[in-house]
Image (tube, coloured by chain):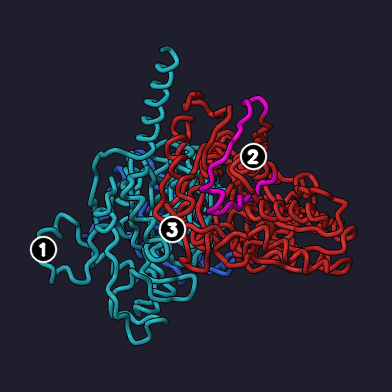
Chain colours: A red, B cyan, C blue
Amino acid sequence: MQDKRNRVLTGTHFEMGNWACTEGAIAAGCTFAAGYPITPASEVANHLAARLPRVGGTFLQSEDEISAVCAAIGASWAGCKAMTVTSGPGISLMQENIGFAVATETPLVIVDVQRLGPSTGVPSVGLAGDIVQVARGSHGDYQIIALCPESPQEMFDLTVQAFNLAETYRVPVFLMADGFIGHMREQIVIPPEGELAIKQRKIPAGSTSPLERRDFQDVDVAPMPVFGRGLQAHVTSSCHDEHGMRNLSDPAVMHQYVMRPIEKIRKHRDEFVQVQADHPEAKTALVSYGTVSRSARAAARLARRQGLDVGTLRLLTCWPFPDKEIRRLAAKVDNLLVVENNTGQLYPYIKAEAAHACRVAFLGPQTLGQIHDPEFILSHIKEMIA
Amino acid sequence: MSVSEHPLRKYTRRHITRTTTCPGCGIGTVSQAILRAIDELGLDMDDFVFVSGIGCSAWIPSPFYAADTLHTTHGRPIAFATGVKLGLPDKNVMVVSGDGDLTAIGGNHLIHAARRNVDLTVVLVNNGIYGMTGGQTAPTTPRGLTTITSPYGTMEHHFDIAPMVAAAGASFVARWTTYHPRQMTRSIKKGIQKKGFALIEAVSQCPVQYGKASKLGSAVRILEYFKENSVRIDKARAMEAEALAGKIIVGEWVDIAKAELTQEWTELRRKLREESECHKLI
Amino acid sequence: MSKVNIFRQSCKGVDDCGICKFVCPQDLFQACQEMNAAGYFPPEIKDESQCTGCRNCMVYCPDFAIWVEKTDDQPAEEDEDKNAG
C-alpha cells in the first residue's frame, strides 16, 4: 500500500472518479484549492482538504463559489498551481471571474462535476449541461480549454493534463466531469512520479518595470509576472496593453485585448486538441464526449456484431472545438450521429462542420436523467442507415 | 534647497504622473496616509501586494503604486486577496477599495475574511455614495439623503462598518475621517503590523457626488462637517444614543491578538511534515 | 524657516480643491495667477516666513502636490490632527 503522505500515489487503485481527480491535481503539483460544498463535486474538495496540507498545500473552504474562484486566481498570481471544483450552480456563480482569469491570463483549473439542471435541478444525476456555459457563460468574447473525461482513470489523467495546459497557456482549463463518473468506482492506475510529464509556467527574469516587459497578450504566451518577486506586476481586468497597463481609449489596444488571448489558444490548438476514433474507416460514426461515450462505444460494438459498419469519435477536448477533426471525419463518412447527454449543446457546432459532407443527426438520452441505453442508440443508428 | 518631486513618489510608478481623482477628493489623502505608513515603518513596496476592486478608491494602488497590484472585479478584492495571502504568507497583502465595493456587492467576503482572521490589511474608503457611477445610494448613505436613485430620500438604514467588522471577528478595527490623516496613518501602521485581519475605515469626502447630494458642495465644507461631527470612541461610549445621532464615531474599536489563518496553516503543514518524517523513521 | 515645495503640475487648484488653504493654521495659501498644464490654478505662499512647519498642507493634500521641509529649530510635527472628536 502506498504511503498516503506521498505526492504521487503510484499504483493500482479502486476508487471514485472524484478521488482520481484529486490525486491527479496533487500529482500535477497543485498547491492551492478553494471550494464550496456542492453535490456531486464535494468529494473532490473533501479529499483535497485532507491531502493538500500533507503535501505542503492549502485548501480554503470559501463562503461561496465566487470567493472560491477569486481565491484560486489570487493564489495563482501568488505562484501556486491553483484550482477550484464545483458543479453547474457554482459555475454559474463563477462566470464573471472566469472572465477575469481569461482577461488576466491566469493559469487555473476548474473542475465541473456536472449535474442535471437548470437551476437546482437534480444534484446527484450526471448530465453534461454545462458544456456551452463554460465556453460562453462569461460576458465578452474569449477562448478557454475544456477536457471531457469518460472514466475515473481519465479523471486522473485529464486533471494532470488540465494543469499542464493551464500552466503552458495561462488560461482557465475546465475538466468537464459529471455525477456519474465522479461517483463511479473503477480501476485507476497512477504511474510512477518520474513518468508523469509535469509543466510549469514561465516567469520573467528580473526586471522591475512592467513597461520593460511583455507580461500579457503574446500569442506564444508571455511569461507570467507572478507576485512576490519584485516584478511590480500590474494586473487588471480592464482593457490593458501588453504591459498590463489600462487603456480605455485606443481601439487598437481593445482589439488586441480581446483577440490575443483567443489567438494564443487557437494558434497552438494542434499541440493539444485530442480526439479518439475507433473503426475510423466505418461509414457511420457516433460522435460523443464524456460519460455517454461509453454507451456510444457499446452501441457501435452491438451494431458491428449485427454487421453494421459503425465507428465512434470521442472528443477528449471539447474547447477549443475540434472543428478540423470533425471536418476530416465528415469527409469520410455517410452518416454522423451526435450522441450527447443533454439536449444537443455541441450538435450545432458539429453540424456546422459536417453537414456539407454527410448526413448529421442528434440523439439525446431516451429520458433526460438516464444515460443512453446502447440498444436505444442502436435503434437510431439503424433508422439513420435505413 | 527645493526638491524636484514629492518624496513619496519613490513608491509610485514612474510613468503615472497624476492622480485620477476629482479635485478635492479625499481618496488622495487616504492614498498618502497609506504610503506614509509604509514609509514610516521602513517597509519596501516589494514587501506588499495590493488588491483592489471596482470604484474610485480601487484606483489608489492601481496603477499608481510601484508594487504588485491586482485590480479585480466589483466586490471581490478580499476574496482574491485571501488567495494571494495564503499563497504568499510572508508578504503584506493590502486591500484598498470603497464602501460600495466592500460592503454592498462584496459584503459577504468582508465579514468572512474578518471571521477567518486572515492576515489582510483592508483600507475601506467610505464616502457614503457611489461616486464613479454618478451618485447612487450606497449601503453607507445616511437615511433621508436624496440621491439619484433615492430621489425622494433614502428610506433604508446604513451600515455602521467598523463595529460590524469588529463583531465579525477582526483583530484590528479603526475608523478615521480624512480630517484625521495622522491618526489614520497611525492606524494603518498598526493594521499592517497586526498579524490578523485589520480594517481601517477611512471616511472620506466625495465633493462631486456626495457634495451634491448633501448640498455641502465642496471638499472643504465636507471636511468641516467631519471636523465638527467626529466623536472619539471613548467619549462616544459615555454618550446617549440621541446625542450621537448624525455623529461620526472615530477611533480604534479592536486591537487584539488571536489565532490567524495563514499562521495556522503554516503550523498544520509543519505538524503533518514532522508526523510524516516520524512515520518514515518507523 | 520651513520650505514649502509646491509641485504645480500635480495640483488640482485652490478654487476647485482648496484643502491646503483650509488646513493652514496661518492662512498662508492663495491661488496663483498662472494656470498649470491641466487647467488648474495651484497655490502660492503669501509669506513663507510665517510658516510654522506644521505640515498640515502636506499631509492633507490629496494630490501629492506639497512637501514641507522643516528646519531643526522648529517644533516636532504633531502626531494627532487636532480639534476633531
Q: Chain of mark 3?
A: B
Q: Which residue is mark 3?
A: B97
> Can you say whether B224 is above or below A4 in the image?
below
- Host chain of mark 1: B
Q: Cα distance, mark 1 to mark 3?
A: 31 Å
User: Left of A13 or right of it: where is A301?
Assistant: right
Q: Along the polypeptide, which appears first: circle 1 or circle 3?
A: 3
Give the residues in magenta: A169-195
Residue placed under numbered mark 1 in the picture: B239
Q: Residue at x 59, y 36 (%)?
A: A188
- Label 1 packing within 10 angstroms: few (<14), some (14-19), many (20+): few
Q: Which residue is mark 2?
A: A157
The amino acid beneath tag 2 is Asp
Give the residue furthest to the top: B281
| CA distance separating discs 2 and 3 | 41 Å
| Tag 1: amino acid | Met
Secondary structure at numbered mark 2:
helix
**In the figure, A212 relative to A283: above or below?**
above
Q: Residue at x 61, y 63 (%)?
A: A133
Amino acid under disc 3: Ser
Q: Nearer the viewer, residue A270 or B221?
A: A270
Q: Residue B252 or A351: which is nearer the viewer?
A: A351
